[in-house]
Amino acid sequence: MTAHSAPKNITLIGVGLIGGSFVLDLKHKGLVGAVTGIDLDRSNLDRALERKVIDRAFDHICAEAVGGADLVMVATPVATLPAVCAELAPLLDGHTVITDVGSTKQSAIDAFRQYLPQQLPRCIAAHPIAGSDRSGALAAQFGLFQNKKLIICPHGAEDSDGLRLVESLWQAVGAQTFRMSAREHDAVFAAVSHLPHLLAYAYVHQIATHPDGGVYFDFAASGFRDFTRIASSHPAIWADICLANKHSLLALLDGQQQQLAALKTMLDKGDAAALYRYFEEAKQARDDWAALQ
Amino acid sequence: MTAHSAPKNITLIGVGLIGGSFVLDLKHKGLVGAVTGIDLDRSNLDRALERKVIDRAFDHICAEAVGGADLVMVATPVATLPAVCAELAPLLDGHTVITDVGSTKQSAIDAFRQYLPQQLPRCIAAHPIAGSDRSGALAAQFGLFQNKKLIICPHGAEDSDGLRLVESLWQAVGAQTFRMSAREHDAVFAAVSHLPHLLAYAYVHQIATHPDGGVYFDFAASGFRDFTRIASSHPAIWADICLANKHSLLALLDGQQQQLAALKTMLDKGDAAALYRYFEEAKQARDDWAALQ
């Protein structure tokens, strides 16, 4: 089966940046029939209808919204996935493939196993690596996934057809697809995505709550702007992600505290050579990474 | 006296991004006569001559390079300022104004007081807020300081003419000038510039030295890119800055460790409400700041 075999009816639960951009591109390529949007926020649904991101809108999960869908994509904050799966369970057709886009994959697979045991062969855990500090249907855009990575985390019980459907649709919108275990996924993204978000929030929180924070902000410039951009990310989405991946993050926060302790020792001793080496190693690693992007 | 009163002969010690961009704009506006560049790196001097950033080049400080200058601008890493001042002391004309561009100002004023006591009335400590992760004469560019901030930190012993000369030249290249005490300056820039650099280096160092760091880097994306951009900054320049401002930084690192400890507690307890509030406060502060830029 390929994405090109027939247009699919898609029900999108959570009509925001990720799900909205996904269906926009599929529509543009003629790969989707009708898109049904489900969202708690009525004004967000209205914007999505106006922008033709979706064709039908529902403000709750119901048989009319879900029945007949070839694919149900859950694109809500990760902590809501168990409740969404529980609501979906009695409503799903026998052929419907269910997928998510969450940033933590062990928690997603746990939710599928617990609340959709009958449908588990058609549950596909996926994660597109295309973040933004913007959110909602207005943020949906064409081409968001072009040359971005998409991780599928097989749980071992899936049908190959469902897995290939999800993979081929993501490839159709331009993503490079990868497969890895949910455990490996969560460790990788704790390190390169969740931890930097936590650290950016922690830094801004420190400055904002400092007695002289007001003056400090007046003189913040371009380095500050880039370093803190991800602290403008959606707080609910990120609180959910961090809690869903807390074991990886707690270990990484310990590691970060050790780095800060080492830096304090170098500063305290005035050890210019050690500080230079430390910065140089980091710069080299970052430059090597940037050269490959 | 204004910047427009007469073209000035400028000797630039350290021909890099900051000093190079400053004289490029002054040349463009006809506000400078000859620019003499002094730099340890002969190939950097050659590039600066080719690009007409400077008109004459010397690879060491000498009477020929410094004599007759109306302004000597020291734009070398901050730790080198004391040695540079000591070399300059016997060579300076009675009318020459001396200024620096370093990111730490208590250390600059200490160097002026100790090594240029005779010239102290003509020593002006200044700091343009225009960073980049690029460096060297090739990085020099027109318009770098347009609408950027420039801080002058009076030490109390300066002639008003020297202070106004420096201020007016920075205004001529487009900078908004501010005055504040060196102590206040160092506290402000520890918070909004030096600490983020340390934290970006610390984060990249942690990932780069992690046993699975290689795989982690493969999946780093746009959030990672922006958060770590300043970890590509020049290691020697930043080791100097951090050591020159170590007391402010040690206090801020303590504060950052407290933030991380608080986050660990919230994660460990699974306290979603507290984590949400924490992220929301940071996002609000960052969004408010960004709206004013």
Image (cartoon, coloured by chain):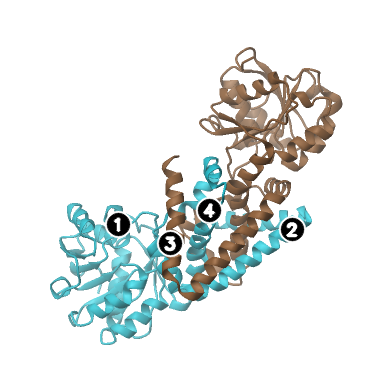
Chain colours: A brown, B cyan
Q: Is residue A70 above or below residue A146?
A: above
Name the front one of labels 4 and 1: 4
Instruction: Compare residues B136 and A138 and report the one nearer the observer.
Output: B136
Amino acid type of the residue tagged 4 in the rendering:
Thr
Q: Which residue is under mark 4?
A: B209
Q: CA distance from mark 1 to mark 2?
A: 45 Å
Query: Residue B106's spot in the image, x, y percent?
Result: 42, 78
Disc marking residue A277: 3
Q: CA distance from mark 3 to mark 1?
A: 20 Å
Neighbourhood count class around disc 4 (C-alpha, 10 Å): few under 14, some 14–19, many 20 upward: few
Q: CA distance from mark 2 to mark 3?
A: 34 Å
Q: Which residue is under mark 2?
A: B266
> Could you tell me which secondary element the residue under label 1 belongs to?
loop
Amino acid type of the residue tagged 2 in the rendering:
Met
Q: CA distance from mark 4 to mark 3?
A: 13 Å
Disc marking residue B136: 1
